[in-house]
Amino acid sequence: MRNEALAPPPPAAPRRAAFAPVHALVQLGAFVGKELSEVRRQPKLILSLIVGFILFNLLVVGIFIGWLAINLDWVIGLFWFLGKAIGLSAFFVLMRGTLPRVRIDELMGFAWKWLVPAALLNIFVTAGAILVIKELNL
């Protein structure tokens, strides 16, 4: 006779996987660039993405890094502007291509373990520096 109290419970969903395999592979690091896997077959899309990316970086360089006023050295200014824009574009492409995607739990762990203590340390060091400066009348 079988003891019913020791029998394992029936499975909740017997024909369903415990997790979606594709999502599990993404979480494990495989298929990191899956969202752009079809881009190889569409050269017009690649060209439009590259042109849009470069135009965006030109706009960012122009607004935030500064446009040189047109004077006698406008050619040097133009080359400097384009060099900064291409450098910024190359930096973004290298970061996107070399660093893995960060999961939200990893990002939150980093924030709580490192960034919050660093911010608190910054507050206390700044407060101490202000007190020392006031004490020394600098």
Image (cartoon, rainbow, N blue to C red):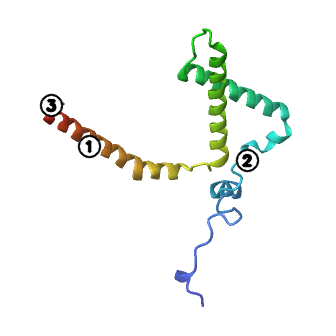
Kindly indicate the quadrant of the structure image that contains residue 61: top right
Q: Are marks 1 and 3 in contact (CB under 8 Å)?
A: no
Q: Secondary structure at mark 2?
A: helix
Dot 1, crowdedness within 10 Å: few (<14), some or many (≥20)? few
Q: Residue furthest top?
A: 71
Spot occupied by residue 77 in the image (x, y as percentages of width and height): 62, 18
Per the rendering, the mark at residue 124 is 1
Q: Give, as a three-letter code, the residue at label 2.
A: Lys
Which amino acid type is marked by label 1? Phe
The residue closer to the viewer here, 127 or 45, is 127
Distance between the Cα atoms at labels 1 and 3?
20 Å
- Label 2 neighbourhood size at 10 Å, few (<14), some (14-19), many (20+)? few
Whether pointer 2 and pointer 3 mark residues with C-beta atoms closer than 8 Å, the reply is: no
Side (left or right) of 127 relative to 84: left
Q: Is residue 124 left or right of residue 29?
A: left
Task: Write down the quadrant of residue 51 in the picture.
Answer: top right
Element type where label 1 sits in the image:
helix
Residue 19's place in the image compared with 43, above or below, is below
| Residue that badge 2 annotates | 34
Q: Secondary structure at mark 3?
A: loop
Residue shown at 71%/47% (left/top)?
33
CB atoms at circles 1 and 2 under 8 Å apart?
no
Q: Residue at x 69, y 62 (%)?
A: 16
Q: Quadrant of the N terminus?
A: bottom right
* Amino acid type shown at disc 3: Asn
Question: Which residue is labeled 3 in the image?
Answer: 137
Could you tell me residue 125's position as x and y percent? 27, 43
